Amino acid sequence: MGRKLLLEHADVPGIETFDVYRKHGGYRSVEKALKTMSPEEVVEEVKTATLKGRGGAGFPAGMKWSFIAKPEGVPRYLLCNADESEPGTFKDRYLMQYIPHLLIEGMIVSSYALGANQAYIYIRGEYMFVLRIVEKAIAEAYEKGFLGKNILGSGFDLDLSIAPGGGAYICGEETALIESLEGKRGNPRMKPPFPAVQGLWQCPTVVNNVETLATVVPIINMTAAEYTKIGTEQSKGTKLISAGGNVERGGVYEIELGLSVEEFIYGDEWCRGIKNGKKMKALVPGGSSVPILPAHLITKTANGDTRLMSYESLSDGGFASGSMLGSGGFIVFDEDQCIVRNTWNFARFYAHESCGQCSPCREGTGWMEKVLHRIETGKGNMRDIDLLADINKKIEGNTICPLGDAAAWPVAAAIRHFREEFEWHVTHPEEAVKRNYGMLKGVTA
Amino acid sequence: MVKVTIDGIEIEVEEGTTILNAARQVGGDIVPPAMCYYSKLEGSGGKCRTCLVEVAAGSERDPRPMPKLMVSCSTQVQHGMVVKNLTSDRVKEARAGVTEFLLANHPLDCPVCDQAGECHLQDLGFENGKEGTRFEEEKRTFAPRDIGDKIKLHMNRCILCYRCVYTANQLTNKRVHGVLNRGDHAEISTYIEKALDNEFIGNVIDVCPVGALTDKTFRFKSRVWFLKPMNAHRDCPTCQGIATVWMFGNEIQRVTGRKDAYGEIETHNGKTAWLCNTCRFESKDVAQWTIEGPRVINRHSVISQGHYVLKNPLEDKSTVKNLK
Ligand SMILES: Cc1cc2nc3c(=O)[nH]c(=O)nc-3n(C[C@H](O)[C@H](O)[C@H](O)COP(=O)(O)O)c2cc1C
Ligand code: SF4
Ligand code: SF4
Ligand code: FES
């Protein structure tokens, strides 16, 4: 049984209300931080905990915080990224829906650490019902004196507001999020300047994922020294994983980093194996942007080591034979799933979500989607497969924001590991169409 | 001043200069193509990715190469930086890729496009494009639209450089011009087809690198290479009245701003000589202008290949000579 630091009380009835949450130890970290620690000490603690950002990129949160510029008389902002739109990822929603106060608590402590007196939660538009829940929790926190002026008599003021997005994946990219929050079109900005220097309204800003901010709570409560006892050498603490696809029991799980992938997929406590007794064919371990792994690279790395649920083990072997922990969107494919179809589906998502600012991403994602659609519907050529690989190469690294890379990687990885399947679609167009299970209406080879 | 080396040519420029502007100070072939950057428009650049260059050494202090190709229009030079543009195979490959991307959905309707002959995408394709296309898919299409009564938008040709959006933002006070939608379906729009009736909105035509925004008062009148560009000026209460008039015989067929080697409106009297709508659209009578004399088209476009070339090459820094 793994330890739970975030979801420990998630199924206590009424935990979404202030009183129940407080009764189960809620808001202790605010008391501890505001009454006994200086902001610098909080930053130091998070640094020592080596907390990696849970939004996907895994950038160390403490380090990000220490970069924030502190010019005299200029406000600083903390933004919570709750735009969660990466296919396969639904952990932030779970956390906000069931224990909204944990996020608020984390944001109070984090804002205190950064010296921010205004914080925002930017939440994706489709999460309107979650927004209502968080809104209610915020109102309670104000009422109880944990938000607003002079919190707990510490002299620290914090206002926390919610801003709903319009449902664009790109607004999860931190600078697009800032633009959107400013009321503009959600186009990513060029970096530098980084948000820590010029973010919201050109003021120093930190953007963190929901789970990152929530994790600050146990770190402060238990101290970094205790926190770092959990996990592996380079991946400390716990991580929320949203498991989906063809597993027996999908859902949001909190795991101790370092759990073996095999245990997670087949263990009774977790996903309980593949549905209908089927064999596993592939795994996307960290949301649609990360490279797909074929069966032989899932439970073992290319070196034959046991593959673990950790930043370093999942990326072991680089892109040749590894993947990434990413956002924790864990998608399992059984033997019946069509990799080409899935790759097309992902490509369609990126083509739809590209903001269209830079030419390689705008044109490349649309182009890849069209080529993949042709292959999937039995109209592909052998040269299309190399064409895809080449389009990929021309997008990767040449765009403003990482969405271009995120669109390129899954296609590259699918071709790398499942090339025969792409070729089979080209050589067996009629069977390829039949394999669509009628899901693509009106398509004939 | 900082020292930077571009394709083996050393130059000293002011601190804070971008790689692209440093290259422009050298001039000639080593200047990376820029389809979205426009020095007179604040915030422009970074989008088209045609100006990507390789930074082989970051600076004297930190001579490590930068792993990614950098956009020269938005990357500032550092002392001791070594930049490779034409001398980098990676750059050539990436730029060929960007060119292919920009042409993927482009209708290639140059024969009926007013911009043909002075189109930056034609130049880019000529220099970095391939003979054939690998894009076999259906192109995305939009119907041509009127933006007010003087400007035509052919969204099919647009490369989404955002120059016109910045122009509308920065030159006019009633902003109704922007981008709708995302990805390859993003489109330039005036939000519900609102006419842009601002005195300076005609400048979107001049900044557009392709034939997406064209002058309706000139549409289909002539191919630009049949016209004689003349420098001209007039007394105008609204703008500086400094223009190029494009003549056929003694008739003025169109009026544009005066563009430099990079297609940017020139600076006169310390200010960018943006043209007002009256000068541009409603001053087609020769009597309204003082004609100064013929204008050298300082670009590697088909116009400068015509018979209408000045004997005196003036300050010709362009690559024309290399094309002969
Ligand atoms: C296209 C794109 C979409 C993103 N979407 C999200 C998102 O929905 N949620 C999120 O937390 N981070 C997202 N990110 C990452 C953010 O840019 C940023 O790195 C993150 O919010 C930082 O938080 P962290 O350091 O706590 O992970 C996205 C990045 C890109 C490029
Ligand atoms: S990479 Fe794609 S999403 Fe990111 S800025 Fe460029 S066009 Fe927009
Ligand atoms: S219409 Fe022209 S200027 Fe405007 S974005 Fe398109 S290509 Fe650029
Ligand atoms: S000119 Fe630099 S990216 Fe377009």
Image (cartoon, coloured by chain):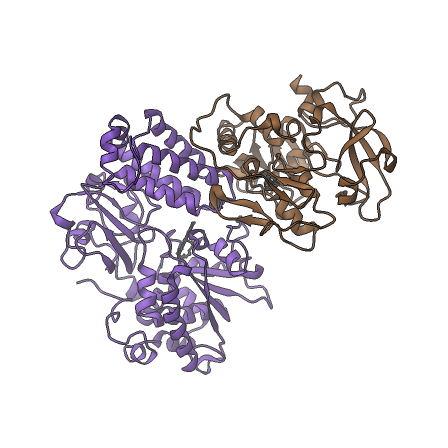
Is any part of residue A305 visible from this angle? yes
Residue, far top: B324
Please state if B59 lies on the left or on the right of B310 as rendered.
Answer: left
Residue at point 31% right, 57% down? A90
In the rendered image, the quadrant that contains the C terminus of chain A is top left
- Chain B, chosen colour in render: brown
Q: In this view, does B63 lie to the left or right of A125?
A: right
Please state the horizontal and vertical placement of residue B45, each as a whole percent of the image.
Answer: 59, 43
**Left or right: B237, with B259 as reference point:** right
Q: Which residue lies furthest to the left in this view?
A: A277
Between residue A381 and residue A141, name the one nearer to us: A381
Which of B95 and B72 lies nearest the eye of the viewer? B95
Q: In this view, does A115 lie above or below B140?
A: below
Residue A129: x %, y % from top left: 36, 66
> In the image, is B304 to the left or to the right of A212?
right
Q: Which quadrant of the picture is home to ligand 4? A: top right
Please give the letter of the chain rendered in purple.
A
Say above or below: A109 vs B271: below
Q: Which residue is drawn at 48% across and 22% down?
A: B132
